[in-house]
Image (spheres, rainbow, N blue to C red):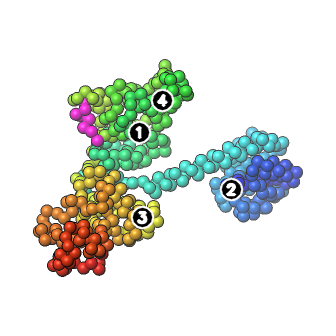
Amino acid sequence: MARNRILIVDDEAGLRFGVRDYLELQGYDVDEADSCQSAQHLFRDSRPDVVVADYLLPDGTALDLLPRLREIDAGIPLLVLTAHGSIDLAVRAIKEGAEQFLTKPLELPALLLILQRILENKRNLHKQLANKSREVRTAIDPFVGTSSAIRLLSEQVHKVLSSDSPILILGETGSGKGVLARWIHANSARSEEAFVDLNCAGLSRDLLETELFGHEKGAFTSAIAAKQGLFEVAHRGTIFLDEIGDVDLQIQPKLLKVLEEKRFRRVGDVRDRQVDVRLVAATHQDIGQLVSEKKFRDDLYFRISTIPLVFPALRSRKEDIPVLAQHLLEKFAADLGRGELKFGPECVEALQSYSWPGNVRELRNVIERAVLLSEHKTLGLNDLHFDGRTRAPLSYYGANLTLLEVECKHIEFVLAEENGSVERAAKRLGVPRSSLYEKLKRHRISTSRF
């Protein structure tokens, strides 16, 4: 693991030696400079992680040095040391961008703690920036397509972005409800705060309650320590409850209280806690039917359905499939370093003919699998594995073809999967090899193109 590097700038050789000796024993690399000029040269060459500089130097002050270093790298913190500290000087140093202001004589253990804290904060900042960059790079646009259904959804969502009212997203499994929820948060006024998500499906009442609201130490046998609930974690941000239709009836009143009063109580606690969150909920179920069956509270339903959004199934917007598939293909190709990939013309027809019971999630899986397994720059039918099977969709050939045309297409498909091998294709088709050759001649199919 790389060692952190500290630059000490002081014209007192004894102080530099003492600090260097102590920090090297603590696992740091240390460079020394005795002036602003030498510090600037060393800074440019070694790029330290932190600079510790005396305020008074032979050719200027630490505050003269600070803007010069910032021109080289504005992200490296500087600590100012002085034997003649004053509140005014400390305030000025912090205002001008110094990380910390310390007075001499210097306590080395205190300096070590400060350096550790600064470096930890710096690492956390880099992680946050990296995560944000990755999120931006990998973010999926839920509105890819040109269909009237997806355009209408986009218009509705953009109208409610500035609102804090609960949102209920309705749609089939895999249609993109979770993607839409994340997009809403990322483009809302709460985007800098936490986005917390929980799939409520299959969770027992007790587990769901403690996940949402937390518990106090000793609230039940296994509660050996207090636990924050997700509503606390999401304070000032967004909480996304997927499959809200599965929430236990006994939990629903507590959920309603959070939405209406912005208050909740941990399991085993005697006091309420305030919280400010926006709820985005989703379900593939018919909540109205659940209400009529007394499986979902009508007051909670009315509260969460202030802004209902319907995410259309993929099969209902087939005109979006080519552009959505190309979008996903480019994303996976870039992520996996495959360069530029494209679909063969037969693939687009096959993708549009399939019914997509798993919606966008299934389309995503099919394309990711094709990119991972195929070695071709142009993906063909044999690269598409629908529903985990290497075959074309049953509806691919269409209802308007003649029987001879269907036979021709099916032979081409099997030959493509068998890489042009007539012997293997004949075996799969259940015909003698001589019969297949006759059919190839009749349909003018050349095996050289497979």
Magenta residues, start to end: 284-291
Q: Residues within 10 Å of mark 3 (few under 14, many from 20)?
A: some
Front in this rendered view, residue 301 or 218: 218
Cβ atoms at labels 2 and 4 below 8 Å apart: no
Residue 250: x and y in percent read 35, 25
> How far apart, in angstroms, are the residues tagged by discs 3 and 4?
42 Å
Residue type highlighted by circle 1:
Leu
Residue 287 in magenta stretch: yes
> How far apart, in angstroms, are the residues tagged by discs 2 and 3?
33 Å
* Residue 272 appears left or right of 381: right
SS for callout 2: loop
**The furthest residue to the right:** 14
Q: Label 4 belongs to which residue?
A: 214
Tag shown at residue 2: 2
Tell me which label, 2 or 1, sits earlier in the chain. 2
Residue 315: x and y in percent read 23, 54
**The furthest residue to the top:** 270
Q: Residues within 10 Å of mark 4 (few under 14, many from 20)?
A: many
Residue 157: x and y in percent read 33, 46
Find residue 325 and report its image quarter: bottom left
The residue drawn where x is 64% and y is 56% is 74
Q: Label 1 belongs to which residue?
A: 198
Tell me which label, 3 or 4, sits earlier in the chain. 4
